[in-house]
Image (tube, rainbow, N blue to C red):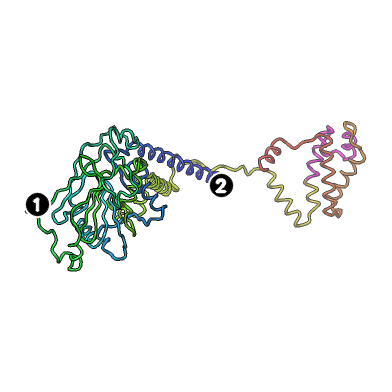
Amino acid sequence: MRQRLTIILTFVVIIGLLVLLNSLTYVRQDETQDMEIAPNRSTYHSGPTGTRALHDFLNESGYKVIRWRETPAKLLDDSALVTTFVVVGQTQISFTEDEAKALHGWIALGGRFVLIDRAVDSQLVPKSRGWSIVSRLFGFPTLDVDPADATQMTENVTALQPVQPTVLTHSVHDVMPSRFASRIMIAPPTGKDHEEYEPDDFGNETMEQYSTRSPAPTVHIADRNGALLVDYAYGLGSIVVLSDPYIVTNGGIRLNDNLQLAINTVAGRDGLIAFDEYHQGRGTNKNALASYFAGTPVLALAAQIILLILLIVWTNARRFGRPLPLPQVDRRSSLEFVASMAELQERSRAYDLAIENIYTRTRRVLARYAGVDHNTSRAEIAARVASRSTIDRHKLETVMRQCEDAINGEPISWRQSIDLVKRLREVERDLGLRMRSREARQAAENI
């Protein structure tokens, strides 16, 4: 049992060390890898480049928000009931051409698409009757830029104000973008441009409503370099483009009226808001459990524990060193024989035999104490013992006579035998007679 406890404690200590080492490694990686040059815009990420603060704020404020982990084609499913689809920053997985077409079809049927990125992907934001938008970059992050430092991120940047009162700029006085924010340029249709979609693309009823809406993008926030926030109609839906994700990230959402602008942009329409996590590497086509714990030390810790368990199972009953002989138990103790004989004598009621075993040894010890031969009469032994000690001669001789009578066949009960043995032990104790050293040692080992 003690050996098993040692193995269990060793196993617990090893697991504890693995947890500690993986936790320290994870914290170190989390501190060094969150950079503006390689951001993580996922709503699961709580670092300065992530968008978890915005997602949790909307959720706790009563807005209906979900993390979308399916392909954009699933948006066309009536059971999804998504009204706003949000893509933040440069995604970990690029949109394919089929995914972009599915997204456009969903927008044309009345969906609201919000793109928050510095580089506007023309594949995601299609033209609307020839009108198109492009982004213009003024700077790129470097390795030494700390996204958690608002001073670095907004160095030499002036807050931007709305250019007109709109739904998207409601309650917004000014916003603070980062120094890496791009600007959006609007390109009007040229003589070569024509209607991008024929009536068969949307259906006659849809085209009738589509034809009454202006396809020209609307600028909401801008400066002399270009627009920061625009939106335009597409089919029955709309597309909103914000050219700086820093405004909605954990590191920048607290500045000026950035939070209010984020709410207006993302939650500007009733219904279910879906943040794209599929293209952030959290899609359901992967293992759901692995995706949930991605970026944490849990997966590495689980793999190490499984490896440790397999190692223990494989090494079960395997010898790591030279064979050792089994411990040899000393079976020569006379106490085992005495115990066995005592049990047999008790069952057979042979009390005289028990007295004989004990009295024979005591008589031999008394004769040695008196300095006479073992065959000397009990009277002489009692007289010599009494002369050398304080024991009464007559009491000792009486005890010796009663023991010899019992040995010679006089009837005796178990109570009388116990009394005689007790009196013999008292004599040995009074005389200071002890058991032999070997018998004492064997008795101590068997306790």
Label 1: which secondary element: loop
Q: Which stretch is magenta? A: 358-385
190 left or right of 273 in image: left
Report the amino acid beneath label 1: Thr
Is residue 359 shown in magenta? yes
Report the amino acid beneath label 2: Met
| Residue 222 % position (x, y) | 24, 43
The disc label shown at residue 190, or none? 1
Q: Which residue is rendered at x = 18% and y = 49% of the image?
A: 133
Binning the other alpha carbons within 10 Å of mark 1 as few (below 14), some (14 to 19) or many (20 upward) gives: few
92 left or right of 211 in image: right
Is residue 113 shown in magenta? no
- Residue labelled with disc 2: 1
250 left or right of 348 in image: left
C-alpha gap between disc 1 and disc 2: 88 Å
Quadrant containing the C terminus is: top right
Considering depth in this image, is 253 or 436 the residue closer to the camera?
Answer: 253
Considering depth in this image, is 79 or 284 the residue closer to the camera?
Answer: 79
Q: Which residue is rendered at x = 66% and y = 43% of the image?
A: 446
